[in-house]
Image (cartoon, rainbow, N blue to C red):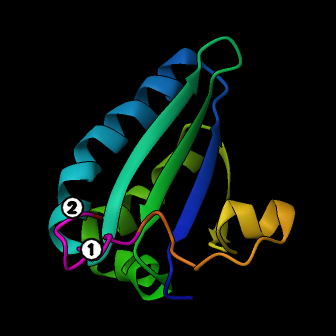
Amino acid sequence: MADGQIVVTRFDCPTYRSLLAVLMLHARLKIEVRRKAGGFVGVKLLIDFRRRTVLSISLWKDLDSVYSMGQVPGHIEATRIPRGFGINTNCGVFCFVGDWRRVMFGSPVRQRSPLQFVEERKDGSS
């Protein structure tokens, strides 16, 4: 899939201390991932303090970009840490399936992932 990938990783933390550990790991790793993983678009954390849960939602140019995480030594090391804190994790990879108008209403619109850059038109507009 060349039109974008979304990776959602869930961290269910048994304590606030373990939740803090997840947040600190992500802050540290974000810099290394930006430098070493090709096709990384960005990441957002959704934090539910009451349930001690973190969702890490990362955006990637394509599936090969997701595999480039194997080139980030800090991430490889960090994957071993949650178990030591008793944190349960699971993850899913989601791909672009089409323009919302086509998916929801069957409209015949041009396919373009929102994770891809818009090409400029000859008149200078997008």
Q: Residue 121 in magenta?
A: yes
Please give the residue where the numbered disc 1 appears in the rendered image: 37
45 and 75: which is toward the camera: 45
Asked if residue 104 is positioned above or below residue 108 in the image, the reply reads above
Q: How many marks?
A: 2
Asked if residue 107 is positioned above or below residue 20 in the image, the reply reads below
83 and 106: which is toward the camera: 106
Q: Is residue 29 left or right of residue 123?
A: right
Q: Main secondary structure of the magenta part?
A: loop
Q: Which stretch appears magenta?
A: 116-125
Please give the residue where the numbered disc 2 appears in the rendered image: 34
Q: Secondary structure at mark 1?
A: loop
Residue at screen point 71% across, 19% down: 51
Asked if residue 55 is positioned above or below residue 106 in the image, the reply reads above
Q: Amino acid at mark 2?
A: Arg
Q: Horizontal and vertical percent for residue 2?
A: 49, 87
Q: Secondary structure at mark 2?
A: helix
Q: Horizontal and vertical percent for residue 78?
A: 39, 56
**Disc 2 to disc 1: CB gap under 8 Å:** yes
